Structures are given as C-alpha cells and as structure tokens.
Amino acid sequence: MYKAFRWGVRLIMAAIFVLVLVGAGVWYFASRSLPDYNATYRVDGLTAPVEIVRSTEDVPHIFGKSDPDVFFALGLAHAQDRLWQMTLLRRTVQGRLSEIFGAETLKTDELMRRLGLYDAALASVPAQDDYTKKALEAYARGVNQWIEIVNKGAMGRGAPEFFLFDNKISYWTPADSIAIMKLMAVELSSQLQDEVLRARVSLAGDGLLRDIMPDDPQQAVAALPAYAQLFPTMPRGIAVAKNDGEGALSPFPSRDLAGASNAWAAAPDRSAAGGSLLANDPHLGLIAPSIWYLARLQLQSGGVIGGTIPGMPLILSGRNRDLGWGLTTAYVDDQDLHIEELDHDDPTKYRTPDGFKPFETKRVIVNVKDAKPVTLTLRWTENGPVLPGSHFDLATITPPNSVVSLSWTAFDRHDTTLSGAMELMRARSIPQALDAVKQVVVPAQNITLADQEGVALVTAGKIPLRDPANDTQGRMPNAGWKPENRWQGYLPFKDNPQFVDPKGGIVVNTNNKTVDRPFPYNVSFRWGDTQRIQRLKKLMGEREVHSRDSFISAQLDTVSPAARGLLPLVGRNLWFTGDPAPAGTPERMRQRALEMLASWDGEMSEHLPEPLIYAAWMRELQNRLIRDELGPLARKFDHLEPVFIERVFRDTEGASHWCDIVQSAPKETCTDIARQSLDAALLDLSKQYGPNIESWRWGDAHMAEQDNPVLGKIPGLKWFVNIRQSTSGGDFTLMRGQTRGGDGPDGFANVHAAGYREVLDFADPDSSVFIISTGQSGHPLSSHYDDLSELWRSGEYIPMSLDPGLARAAAAGITHLVPRAKPPGT
C-alpha cells in the first residue's frame, strides 16, 4: 500500500513537472514575439532615420523627415503590436479564413467571396491621389519590414496565434489597407438586414410594421406596399429561417449591433476657456485587443494625434494643431436588395428592363483546412452580386424562381475614401476639411469638426439617388428588373447634410436623424438613435459655456432617457396600488421593486439594482407583447424598442391591441401585461441573484465582454486573454454599453461600446485626452495588453501631446529605424 502511494506521488510530481516544463516552453516561445521598444533596426525602404518614441502607455510618437517615412514607421509599429489582428482582418475581407480555421468559417468566406470587396479594393488603388499612394506603399513596406525582422530573428513568428495556425504571412499591399476600410463599412451597415426584417414582418400580417418598425412620423412617407402585394407568388405568413446566423467570425453585425457613436462640439463662444471643444466616442463591438490603437504622427504639415485602426495609415479620429474631428455612423441607406427573376427556360439568365440577360459569372476555389476545397460559382447582375438564400434569412423572402442581388456603395471600384481621410488629417480649417471629405465613398460617416474659430458637422460618403417612383423607397427588397427600382447614381456632395457654425454654437450627433427631407433626398428611413440625442441636447443646453470637464462628464453620462420615459408610462396603473403584501410573497417583491423604481432617476449605475429590474422588466414586457403576433420572428427584436413600447402604451393609432394575447380567451389590458411581465422578470432575477432585491447589481449582469476572437475560445486559456469588467451604462445611455440581447443568462452583457474616446480642447491643446478599451498590444503576455482597460472602465483618460519635447521627455522606449542603404539616385 505504501509502495503504491509512493509511486502515485511520484507520478503526480512527474505530471506536474511535465506541465511546468511545457508551460515554460510555451511561455518562452510565445514571449519571443514581444517586441523590444528600445531596439535599433537597419531597414530597407526609408530615406532617413526615424524615431518611434513610446510613452508609458505604449503609444507610439513617430518622428521622421518625410511623410512616407512616418507612414513606414506606423506600419512597422502596427505590425509590432497587432500583426495577428491585421492578418485576421485581411483574411476576413478576402474570404480566406477557412484556410486556417476549417469548415466553421466557410459560410463567412462564401459571403465575402460573393461580395467581392477585396476585388473592389484592388481596383481602387489607382484611384488614390499621389500622396495617398505613396503613404499606402510606405505603410506596406513598414509592415513587411517587421515581418522580415520577425522571420530573420526567430521572434516567435510575430504573435502567439501563429503557433496555432499557418504561420505563413503574406506581405502587406496598398490594397489591403483599402480593403480594411471596406471591412469597416461591413461592420457599420445594417440596412440590408433591416430590409429583410421589414419584408418578413410584412408577410406576418397587416399593420404590424407600422408599430414595430415605424417610419419617422415627422416625414411625409408614402404608404409602404405589402411585400406579398409586390410579389404575389410569395407565400404569406412567417417562414422559419433554416440557417440562422452568418457563420463564425462573420464581420456582419446584427441589426441592433451595427455601428453607433456620439460626437459633439462647441464653438469658442460656448467654451469657458475661449477655445473650441470636441468629444467623440465611436461604438463598435468589444474585442481584445480593441480595434482601436492610439498613435501620434509628425507629418510635414504638423503633428496629428488620435485613434487609428491597425491596417490603415490613418488617424481616423483625432486632431492636429488647428483642427479636430470625430466620427459617428451616418445611417445612410446605402444598400438595396433586389429580387431578380430567373428565366424559366434558362436559369443562367435573369430579367432586366431589356429582357433576359445572362449572369456575369466567375468560379473561385475556397481552400478549407482539413477538408476538400470548395468551388463557388459567383454571379453578378446589373444591380450587384447575387447573395445565397442561406445568409441573412434571404430564403424566407425570396419568391419562387428568383434570387436576390445587392446594390451597395462599398462595391465602388473607384473608392477614394482613403485619399479623403488622408487630406482630412492635413486640413487646417473647417473649409479645408469639408473639401477633403468630398472624396469619402464608404462607410458613410457624420464627421464632426472643430477648428480655432468654429464647429461643423457634415455627412461624408456617397448617398444613392433613387427614383421617386421606386416601389419600396429602399425600405424593402424590390423588383430588380424595373428601371424605377435601380439606382440613378448618387446625390451630389452639396446635397449631403451639412451644418457649419450653427446658431447656438454647438453641433451634436448620436446617430440621430439629421435632416427632414422627403424621399428620395431623405438620406435614410432608419436612424440609429431616438433616445441618446434627448439626453445630449439636455446636457448641452444646461450650460451657457462648456469646458473639457463638462464634455468628459457628458461622455460618461449613464442616465437612460428611455428608462425615464417608459417607466412612468408602463407603470402608471401599478404605482402604489393595493395594500402591503406579506413579506416573501411575489406581490411584496413587486411592490418593493415598484417603490425602488419610483424613486430612481434612471441612472444605469453598475452598483444599483434598479437598472437590472428595469431592463429585465422591459425585456419581458416586449417579448410578451410581440411573441404571439410574430412567433419565431420575435427573437429578431431581442433589444428594447422604446418607440414601439411608447406607441403601445399610448395607444398610438390603436397600437394597444398588442397587449391582448391572441391565443387566450380573456382580453388582456396593457396594465395586465405590465404587471405580469414585472412579476416574471422578478422571479427570473431572484433565481439568478437571490431573493434579496436590494443586493442585486446591474454590473453583475452588465459585464463588458472583451474577448480575444481566437485565443479566447480555447478552454483554460480564455481565462487569461478575455477581459471581463463590471460596467455602467446601457443601450440608451451616452456612455453606451449595448447589451447582447435575447433572454439568455448573458443577455445583458455589454458587448458593444465606445472602444475609443477623445475629448479635445483647443484653448489648451495639450490637455486633450484619449483612451481605448484594452491596451495597445495584442500580445496577451505584454503588460500593455490590458493596461488601459481599467482606466476605460472607470471613466479615466490619458493625455497625449503634440509637443515633441514632452513625448521624448516621458519616453518609456525609443525604437530607431535606420536606412540600410541610401536609395538609388540619392
């Protein structure tokens, strides 16, 4: 017995030793890809020495004697910290994920190949101006130089992920950077999904669209014909989608998680210190590392500082000495779906205004790891590429003997967006900035501007011009063979929404409606916000003059206008009614919850129980209102729709009919549904968080999930690479923390938020502050992988100065890039 025990101990000790040895080996090889920020490298492709001065937060400040040299160094810095992220983004837009991930990403690759965005990027390279071409080429040389340094120095393949997957890294090209910008258009677009959902709701029953997906009541909108009326062969009713989801690592967001952002600016006469102010916080899906990366570039036109996205040589949101800018998604309706009728006798042809024509076709091969290659036949119509019914639930709205095609500004093969962004970085005034952004094609963005004298807001990006006789006005799929349903070109830039030095001296945008114009000049029928704008306008109007601190306070504001508006309306017949119920009963819990909500100010603080009670109540309420009418479609509305709830409880145009459960014999009132929903929500919460309602905390449910998209899925390893934090805010607060949605246990998780924040003060430029949600490095073993995340969570920032002396004085490391040899002819 004793002998067996001794051998057991020895085996356990041996196993522990082997595990430690393996762990040490993994750590050793993985750590070799950590860059040395104090190194000197002799490199090809430079005309003169360059310095990359790293701050204590790992923000590179790049100093060179020419702009191409500076962009070269930015490419190298991006590759040092985010090489895996860059290659993953490139593979996504190329449709080449399955080469390393296998069949799980095949659906994503198929869609990206059919869209052909990378081909459009390749075609757009010659369209860039000379300055941008040189910048793109220099940036690519910088990325490739780091790849060579890694390969020659056996530096752990450049990132830990390359140990798990194919470590062959293709060299970067100028087209790759343009393709990354087009990928951003994918992440910021949801008009396509909106069209499909409208069609499906229209087929579900008459009058449903008016309430659950209402058009803006302030616009004179022509009645939208029923989808079944447009396509009589389309079966009525709710078709169940056979393929739900867009595939692993799909860049396409759900309808509710498309791009969002806040930006506002105040002119000098509205500033306490006499200089313009600007705040911006773009909202995207949370990941680790963040999609954002801070940097400072010393160009010949002066210093530029702010947020970049690795893969592009741009400060996308930031400032130079004289001008600041911020971005918000414009919600331009730049996508249209078309039903293409096939020739009954020859399905290789489709109907056009001039008769049946053959599809333009192309065969491509998608290589799949550990499986046979897949051959795809890509098809294009005059309206755009043909999409398979397996994506976006398209099969549920496609009539027999038809396919669906897509028109989208992202297919533009003369896309000069990068040239416009490059020119914006070097603009010195609002007029120069407005001239620069004329070149932006996609993604369409509202650009908020501030210079030394004033402020402005302009929608940059191409806006499709539709025929006034368009069958659906772009709100639902239309008949692609009708001339009136095809795009008529684009609106001239002068017709894009534009507000320069407005009366009052303040411009604001939260993805809200920007213009009141009739179709086809309306920009969009769907806007990204109806709630945050209320709060921001209130905060801006409360003070005669603002300061950097008041802008920071607004950026971090967590009061929900939706909660303030809906609770009195939904609970108006429930407040303080009935005698006190016995302790421990559901009635008593309901009374206590109502007491707490009655004195709550709507602040979605992570430390309070009220936000959790409110959110769970509204989720249950909406689900009960819609699930009998919409059936399986109800799960498509898995986020709160405040306008819908308000219509129902105000009985706008008879909308209170949603409160009656069709399948039940009694006629339920809206008060009945409100009470039942609250009771059900409280029961569910008590199962998750215990019976003591005062001990519940919103932050326990509203955890920010910043997960590594690859390493974060590996058991054991995910606990080290995924960043989870309790957060305040919610779906409709200025400090937005968009929830995952749905009724699952993690439905309130924070998955979409401001991964980047900036507040700029032109009265004291060096007091401008910035933050990203993780850290600068994408390497989990780096101290800069998550060092900024706690500052971000707690609403703090870091300063970034345009003063070269300050940057060098506070340097935590300086990388020297020295030309290996003088270029020919010098």
Image (cartoon, helix red, strand yellow):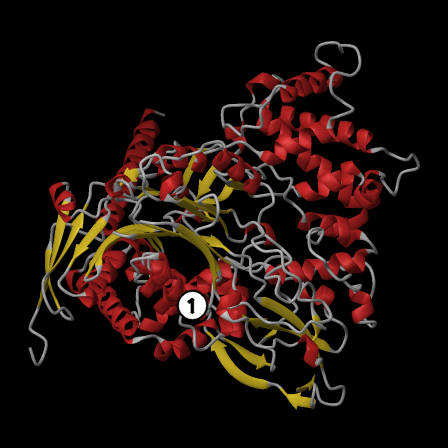
The residue most toward the right is 665
Residue under the point 27% across and 42% down: 18
Q: Position of residue 192 (x, y in %)?
A: 61, 63
Q: Secondary structure at mark 1?
A: helix
Q: Position of residue 132 (x, y in %)?
A: 30, 71
Residue 688 appears in the rendering: no
Tell me where residue 120 sits by quadrant: bottom left
Looking at the image, residue 354 sits to the left or right of residue 304; the answer is right
Number of numbered discs overlaid on the protein picture:
1
Q: Which of 308 and 14 lies nearest the eye of the viewer?
A: 308
Q: Position of residue 787 (x, y in %)?
A: 30, 38
Q: Which of 450 and 642 lies nearest the eye of the viewer?
A: 450
Looking at the image, residue 358 sits to the left or right of residue 164; the answer is right
Looking at the image, residue 492 sits to the left or right of residue 428; the answer is right
Residue under the point 80% across and 56% down: 204
**Residue receiving disc 1:** 438
Relative height, residue 133 to residue 670 (above, below): below
Instruction: Give the class, few, some or many, for how many residues have Cα within 10 Å of label 1's Cα (few <14, many ≥20).
Output: many
Residue 554 appears in the rendering: yes
Which quadrant does the N terminus fall into? top left
Relative height, residue 645 to residue 147 (above, below): above
Which quadrant does the C terminus fall into? bottom left
